[in-house]
């Protein structure tokens, strides 16, 4: 079993820069230094910039919480990132992504989307991650449905959660205790 390479630091171990970063995270909508930022706190300037970007992408993006959470799940599944999955699968369902869609993504099946905007988010994210490009027709549909800012925010979400996945995979960050949503093998 993997061990957590960068476990939480006790607040009395924080440098001045780490304390400033941690206090900003705690004062924001997250309310605590949570998993992605536990290993990142070792690089306080990176952590500060990343958490600010993440705060925008997660809570205020042009595509809204429901579609943002779907994009996060698609990215977590792509990278097999258990931490992000455990945190965001329940949030996605709370925001309106159906359990059937969440389960299908986890099990690598085609999700039974009932909404066109969810199918579109899926296409943009999967094409970006799998094909390393977004097809012209998908791009045009995305801009028509979400606007240019919406498409850029969507790509930003996939990129940001890719970065978090890399950090937590490298650090072997374990999923939070008490969250039982796990990716299918």
Image: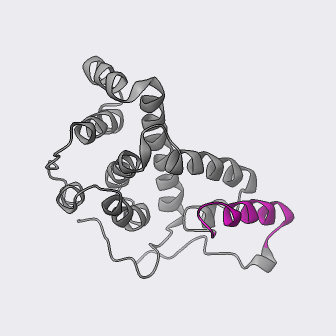
**What number of labels is visible?**
0
> To which quarter of the image does residue 19 belong?
bottom right
Residue 74: percent from left, percent from top: 32, 49
Q: Is residue 80 visible?
A: yes
Which quadrant of the rendered structure holds the C terminus?
bottom left
Q: In this view, does 114 lie to the left or right of 140?
A: left
Residue 151: percent from left, percent from top: 42, 30
Q: Which of 64 and 77 is in front in this view?
A: 64
Which residue is depicted at the point 39% across and 60% down? 81
Q: Residue furthest right?
A: 16
Start and end of the magenta stretch?
A: 14-32
Q: Is residue 163 visible?
A: no
> To which quarter of the image does residue 167 belong?
bottom right
Which residue is depicted at the point 62% across and 68% down? 31
Above-or-below relation of 164 to 9: above
Residue 35: percent from left, percent from top: 54, 67
Residue 48: percent from left, percent from top: 70, 52
Q: Is residue 106 left or right of residue 13?
A: left
Render colour scheme: one colour
Which residue is depicted at the point 37% across and 23% down? 143
Q: Is the magenta stretch mostly helix, strand or loop?
A: helix
Which quadrant of the rendered structure holds the N terminus?
bottom left
Above-or-below relation of 86 to 167: below
> To which quarter of the image does residue 117 belong?
top left
């Amino acid at each position: 079993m993997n061990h957590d390479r960068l476990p939480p630091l006790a607040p009395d171990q924080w440098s001045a820069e780490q304390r400033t970063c941690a206090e900003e995270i705690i004062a924001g909508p997250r309310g605590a230094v949570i998993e992605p930022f536990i290993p990142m706190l070792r690089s306080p300037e990176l952590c500060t910039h990343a958490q600010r970007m993440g705060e925008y992408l997660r809570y205020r993006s042009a595509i809204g919480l429901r579609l943002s959470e779907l994009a996060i799940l698609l990215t977590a599944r792509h990278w097999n990132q258990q931490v992000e999955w455990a945190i965001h699968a329940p949030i996605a369902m709370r925001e309106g992504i159906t359990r059937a869609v969440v389960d299908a993504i986890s099990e690598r099946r085609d999700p039974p989307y009932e909404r066109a905007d969810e199918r579109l988010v899926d296409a943009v994210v999967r094409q970006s991650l799998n094909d390393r490009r977004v097809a012209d027709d998908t791009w045009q549909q995305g801009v028509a449905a979400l606007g240019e800012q919406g498409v850029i925010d969507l790509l930003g979400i996939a990129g940001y959660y890719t970065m978090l996945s890399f950090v937590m995979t490298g650090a072997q960050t374990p999923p939070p205790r008490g969250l039982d949503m796990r990716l299918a093998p």
